Amino acid sequence: MNYKAINLDEKFGLFTEQWQPKVIAEMNDYQFKVVKLQGDFIWHDHKDTDETFIVIEGTLRIDFLDGAVSIGPGEMFVVPKGVEHKPYAEHEVRLMLIEPRGLRNTGDEGGERTAANDVWI
Amino acid sequence: MNYKAINLDEKFGLFTEQWQPKVIAEMNDYQFKVVKLQGDFIWHDHKDTDETFIVIEGTLRIDFLDGAVSIGPGEMFVVPKGVEHKPYAEHEVRLMLIEPRGLRNTGDEGGERTAANDVWI
């Protein structure tokens, strides 16, 4: 059989739009997604699951009600379930998300930042 | 509260031993582990779960019964559950594993490559 590794830079080279996560792999009922972000996301939480952010390029800030974390290239952070957070990036950031299949990116908040699910690249 | 990103290079700088995965983060019932490998692992599979390999530095080869995949820096691969595989690295490779908490690295095979679980760094 022909096995092939998934190259993150190659995946990021396939699209330019921001805020639209693309699935690149699955592990059991979890999905790995790549996304480009710039600017402000909305405040939201995920009641039933943690969510993992791995920064590939650029810097992501995640604001919490009682603080913030800055995540640079080669760094990761797991937002615990139920914790309200708001991602923000001054300049475009490339990151990989890991979360359960079917999770809505905006939690229960909805709104214009809500992205389509299960879009593969 | 004081939030801090997890820096992978910093974690790799904290140990030198090979074949001993260290937990750096958890997402629900999954763990993120960093490990340094060189040489041959054993043939094994995981009956109940997929397993994710993300290469940070170096090159990892995973042999399958009917092929092989080469995974370089910035690349990842998910080994499906039940698929027999054997990791191999000619030179030391630094990688991150993502797998359910409590999974035995050698599957049902055991042996000297079996590592302690739940060692945090």
Image: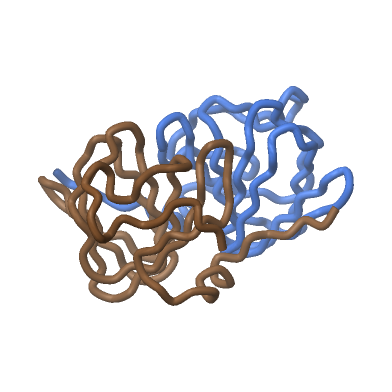
Chain colours: A brown, B blue
Residue B91 x %, y %: 72, 59
Q: Is residue A31 shown left or right of residue B10?
A: right
> Which residue ends up furthest to the right in the rendered image?
B66
Q: Is residue A68 shown left or right of residue B55?
A: left
Residue lying at 81% horizontally and 36% vertically, measured from the top left: B43
Q: Is residue B25 above or below residue B72?
A: above
Residue A81 x %, y %: 29, 36
Residue lying at 80% horizontally and 37% vertically, measured from the top left: B84
Q: Is residue B47 above or below residue B2?
A: above
Residue A27 x %, y %: 58, 42
> Which residue ends up furthest to the left in the rendered image?
A66
Residue B116 x %, y %: 58, 27
The count of marks equals 0
Q: Is residue B80 shown left or right of residue B85?
A: left
Closest to the observer, A65 or A41: A41
Closest to the observer, B105 or A27: A27
| Quadrant position of residue A3 | bottom right
Q: Is residue A86 above or below residue A121?
A: above
Residue lying at 63% horizontally and 31% vertically, measured from the top left: B49
Residue lying at 74% horizontally and 29% vertically, measured from the top left: B112
Quadrant location of the C terminus of chain A in the rendered image? bottom right
| Quadrant position of residue B121 | top left
